[in-house]
Amino acid sequence: MEQIENSLIRQILNGATERYAELVQLHENAVFALIVRIVGSCEEAEELTQDVFLKAYSNLHKFKQQSTFSTWLYRIAYNKAISQTRGRRIVQLELDESRLMKISDEELDAFEQSESSNDKIERLIRAIEALPSEERALITMVYYNNLSLQKCAEITDQSLGNVKVKLHRIRRKLYQMIKSENYG
């Protein structure tokens, strides 16, 4: 995939601008999915997705291939979506931090591996939707888009260790939200 993307990029930069549609097709669903999870609105996500691809096109000459094209593109999408949500007033969930830290890894694993019911899945989705946008983005990249933790670290401009810690904390938070049914 990376070779195909790099070949397309070279062709586009050499004047075959119509080939950009192929890059868009390769990534539009994943970019849209990431953005919609962050902003929470399909209409807003559609507009932001278009903005992301326009920005990527106009800055394609700046892509230095230090990472994959998809990482570079997802970083643009992540930053655009997070910027869009920054001005919003978000109701913060009141979670007892000390209780959150007392949840054992074994308790989390047992809960996650327990029988999946539609009700449990529905509660999990509602809990994820109640998370702050940056936490929703991380969950989306790892569990919905199946991106590696390293790629998530590159996209969010964080260390790999920081991404691992945040994901672990988000798992605890989701567990507590679902158990207490405190997700808005």
Image (spheres, rainbow, N blue to C red):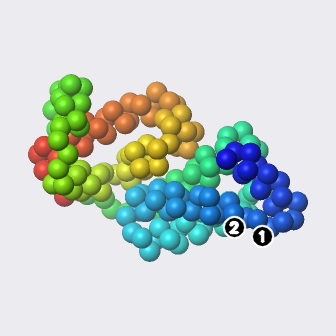
Disc 1 to disc 2, C-alpha distance: 6 Å
Residue 74 seen: yes
Q: Residue furthest left?
A: 180
Quadrant position of the C terminus in the picture = bottom left
Disc 1 marks which residue?
18
49 w.r.t. 1: above or below: below
Left or right of 76 in this view: 152: left
Which residue sits at x=50%, y=30%?
A: 160
Of 68 and 93, nearer the camera is: 68
State if disc 2 and disc 1 touch (CB < 8 Å).
Answer: yes
Return the residue nearer the eye: 78 or 17: 17
**Which secondary structure, mark 1?**
helix
* Residue 158 visible from this viewpoint: no
Residue type indicated by callout 2: Ala
Q: Amino acid at mark 1?
A: Glu
Residue 98 picture location, percent across and down = 18, 30
Q: Could you classify mark 2 by the number of other residues whose Cα lies within 10 Å: few (under 14), some (14-19), or many (20 or more)?
A: few
Secondary structure category for the residue under label 2: helix
Q: Residue at x 69, y 63 (%)?
A: 22
Q: Which mark is residue 21?
A: 2
Question: How far from the left and from the top, in percent, is residue 51?
Answer: 60, 68
- What residue is shown at x 33% (from left), y 62% (from top)? 89
Q: Residues within 10 Å of mark 1 (few under 14, many from 20)?
A: few
Which residue appears farthest toward the bottom when viewing the image?
Answer: 43
In this picture, is 45 found above or below 95? below
The residue at 56%/44% (across/down) is 155
The image quadrant that residue 157 belongs to is top right
